[in-house]
Amino acid sequence: MPEKNYSEILEDVLKILERFAKPSEKISEETELVRDLELDSLQVMEIVQEVEDSFDILFPLNDISGIRTVKDFVLKIQKEANP
Amino acid sequence: MNSGLLEKLKPVANARKTLLDLNIDPFSVQIEELLSPTEARIGGKNVLLAGTNNYLGLTFDADCIEAACRAIREQGTGTTGSRMANGTFAGHTALETEMAAFFGMSQAIVFSTGFVANLGVISTLTGAGDVVLIDADSHASIYDGCRMGGADILRFRHNDTGDLEKRLKRLGKRTSNTLVIIEGIYSMLGDRAPLARIAELKKKYGFWLMVDEAHSLGVLGKTGKGLAEEVDCLKDVDFIIGTFSKSLGTIGGFCVSDHPELDLVRYSSRSYIFTASPSPATIASVRQALRILAAGTEIRRKLWDNTNRLFSGLQGLGFRLGPEATPVIAVYMGTKEETLKKWQSLLENGLYVNLVLPPAAPDGSCLLRCSVSSAHTGEEIDRIIQAFSTLK
């Protein structure tokens, strides 16, 4: 899989998150996944699976605890996708 | 004023208020009197029980009751101690020997509940640097056991072996330190794991395999050992976990294995060391129930006759059911409010089933979950079908 930069990963992540968020929700890098998007734990785990498949990476559930914002999420994916 | 720690309970309070406003309180059902394995008094009325996980109906078996009473008279009401201290009686050791023999394995450990068996075994076997790869629909105790261990937790889509293999490929050499965990029968939808295919993947990728047979012990397999026996994969499974609180009608948990190292798990497992051991009455009734299970197939033939009768009856009414007929029969309902009202309506009509609301059910579904018992009579199965027909 070709290496993706931050902006490309952000774009893909936003597409995934939009499927789980309320239609009215405007999502940005600073959006907080749980507080702003009101995602429950099951939704978060489903998003992680989607991300794993989209970027062909492993994303352990125990790594979620350190992630608050969309930006945190994208940086973590970038690290896993481009080790 | 901010209520600090208690603030997080506000959503729970709101959810409960919604239920109470509907005049429905499904999570506070009180069984006033047990009349048999399949009948109880609830709200002053006789109610047929179709949501008890009492698959073999052994809770009122005369020999199990007598064994429990004798154990209380001879050994007292409780052990008052941990297995590692004063809580291992001769019965605990004998039960471990009998469980290992029943499964044809060399090792067995008995825990105080099935939940703590999963906590204890998973968190001891896996740690930092290891991987646990679990089915997405795994029981809460499996998730919690994984968290306690500190290994990397990955999940694959429910019963999707293609999805599992994709993740195994990504793991590369790490599969030798990976524990894959599946269940014999999944507790919400009642479907079996594709164990035969997963055993093939194990040969290819070299991971470790654990099967939780909580809902399949006494239900599946020629002699009731569970799914691993049914699909002839007992030798492919590294660890079998289970509970005594369903088919065997009491409470407690176990792990069996052919790996001699399982015996060392008891020295490191916090949920084995730091809790009181099962009471003498519990152990005695489990041992008797295991004898009944091992002795014959008639009780399980009756269970499957009842299962097929209920599954086809509900299917005939046009309900959408779980993917296959097992003694866990999930009936899909509509919205949360509709499902609550239908659950209440069944109870008022003298039928108790389990109410399953998101997030407990997969995919945000609302379910009315029936569990079948070999103790149900044919007439009782027909009454369950009749009660559901009033919901159409």
Image (spheres, coloured by chain):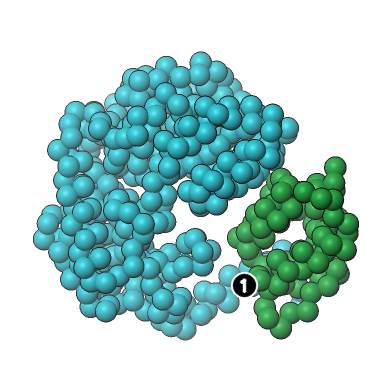
Q: Quadrant of residue B93?
A: top left
The x, y position of residue B377, in whole percent, is 13, 55
Q: Is residue B327 visible?
A: yes
- Which residue is the site of mark 1? B11
The chain assigned the colour cyan in the figure is B
- Look at 43% across and 83% down and name the residue there: B22
The chain assigned the colour green in the figure is A
Q: Amino acid at mark 1?
A: Pro
Is B171 drawn above or below residue A58 in the view shown? above
Mark 1, other Cα within 10 Å: few <14 / some 14–19 / many ≥20? few
Is B305 drawn above or below residue B289 in the view shown? below
Under circle 1, the secondary element is helix
The x, y position of residue B341, in whole percent, is 37, 79
Q: Residue pushed farthest left?
A: B379
The x, y position of residue B91, in whole percent, is 35, 23
A71 or B65: nearer the eye? A71
Q: Quadrant of residue B296?
A: top left
The x, y position of residue B228, in whole percent, is 38, 33
